[in-house]
């Protein structure tokens, strides 16, 4: 597995950039489909989706500690176990760290929930936002820890409205803004379920950019195959003419054609602009199984 990791790039960037080192979940590497490895400085995090031999795992940890500059902790998260527990295999016990991406800082939490606080596959999307938000009013749906919002303010956005039904992740989003010394007066944090609270979303309209990065399924609140149309059909009442739309889809069983068809049916005034690709490390054996990010423009 280690032969597929580009350690040379880490030597030049070890202290500054978080990144996925190995993406086995893309099924492009036979025999390693159950393993991901991330660099969240100064932690190398192994994620397992099925059990492995403990001696093999310890050997992997030893090699990562040896080969990664500035690594002081190797940890493993067992997604194959109830509640996805995290163990320290080598080095220090680190529960919190701050990582860098595109010149911005983000808080990372280890061992406290299934996700760390930053989704690495959409790095290029955040980079696009940072470069295209000057003076824009931005709507950030399913904002999680507000990484898109941080990128938008770094791009000199006029205002960002973050919508998420989880208050605790919005609190972490506020911390991410403060970590980057950004003016939180330009940011709103709305802890609501958008499907029941369109009036709250519309309160700050019209918007110049909408980012929609929903979970594929969240019991009791989101079933994206059923619910994406509810977002798309609201575009005319939320967006300015010529507004941009970043539509994300992370459901392996839904292709980008699902997005195209949904947009065509429920808001045909949207014109496709371009795809935003994931970083090269997120290699997929079958095209369309990973994250899909499509840019549209609303032209009424």
Image (spheres, rainbow, N blue to C red):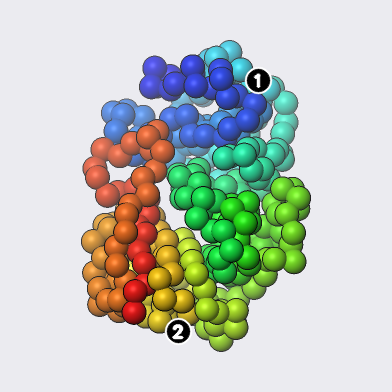
Q: Is residue 70 above or below residue 153?
A: above
Residue 61 seen in the figure: no
Q: Position of residue 28 (x, y in %)?
A: 29, 33
In the image, taking residue 222 as reference, residue 110 lies left or right, namely right
The image's mark for residue 107 is none
Q: Is residue 140 above or below residue 196?
A: above
**Quarter of image, res 51:** top left
Q: CA distance from mark 1 to mark 2?
A: 50 Å
Disc 2 marks which residue?
A: 237
Identity of the residue drawn at 63% across and 65% down: 158
The image's mark for residue 70 is 1
Q: Position of residue 240 (x, y in %)?
A: 46, 76
Q: Position of residue 177 (x, y in %)?
A: 70, 54
Query: How many numbered marks does the figure carry?
Result: 2
- Seen as rendered, the residue at the extreme bottom is 199
What secondary structure is found at the residue carrying circle 2? helix
Identity of the residue drawn at 49% across and 17% down: 8
| Discs 1, 2 touching: Cβ within 8 Å | no
Which image quadrant: the C terminus?
Answer: bottom left
Q: Is residue 164 above or below residue 50?
A: below
Residue 207 seen in the figure: yes
**Quarter of image, res 138:** bottom right
Identity of the residue drawn at 48% across and 34% down: 20
Among the two numbered marks 1 and 2 on one chain, the one whose residue lies closer to the N terminus: 1
In the image, taking residue 40 as reference, residue 259 lies left or right, namely left
Which image quadrant: the N terminus?
Answer: top left
Crowd around label 1: few <14 · some 14–19 · many ≥20 (10 Å): some
Identity of the residue drawn at 30% across and 76% down: 269
Q: Position of residue 245 (x, y in %)?
A: 41, 65
């Amino acid at each position: 597995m280690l032969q597929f990791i580009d350690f040379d790039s880490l030597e030049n960037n070890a202290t500054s950039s978080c990144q996925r080192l190995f993406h086995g979940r893309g099924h492009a590497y036979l025999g390693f489909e159950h393993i991901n490895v991330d660099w969240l400085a100064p932690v190398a995090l192994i994620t397992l989706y099925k059990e492995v031999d403990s001696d093999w795992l310890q050997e992997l940890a030893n090699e990562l500690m040896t080969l990664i500059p500035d690594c002081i902790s190797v940890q493993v998260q067992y997604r194959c176990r109830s509640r996805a527990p995290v163990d320290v295999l080598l080095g220090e016990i680190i529960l919190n760290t701050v990582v860098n991406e595109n010149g911005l800082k983000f808080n990372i939490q280890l061992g406290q929930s299934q996700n760390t606080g930053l989704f690495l596959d959409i790095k290029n999307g955040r980079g696009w936002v940072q470069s295209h938000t000057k003076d824009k009013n931005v709507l950030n749906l399913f904002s999680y820890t507000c990484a898109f919002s941080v990128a938008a303010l770094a791009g000199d956005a006029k205002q960002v409205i973050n919508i998420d039904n989880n208050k605790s992740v919005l609190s972490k989003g506020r911390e991410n803004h403060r970590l980057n010394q950004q003016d939180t007066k330009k940011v709103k944090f709305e802890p609501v379920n958008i499907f029941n609270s369109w009036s709250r979303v519309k309160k700050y309209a019209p918007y110049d950019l909408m980012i929609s990065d929903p979970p594929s399924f969240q019991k009791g609140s989101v079933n994206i195959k059923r619910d994406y149309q509810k977002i798309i059909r609201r575009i005319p009442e939320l967006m300015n003419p010529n507004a941009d739309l970043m539509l994300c889809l992370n459901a392996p069983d839904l292709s980008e054609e699902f997005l195209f068809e949904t947009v065509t049916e429920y808001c045909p005034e949207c014109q496709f602009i371009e795809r935003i690709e994931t970083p090269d490390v997120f290699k997929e054996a079958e095209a369309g199984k990973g994250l899909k990010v499509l840019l549209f423009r609303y032209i009424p």
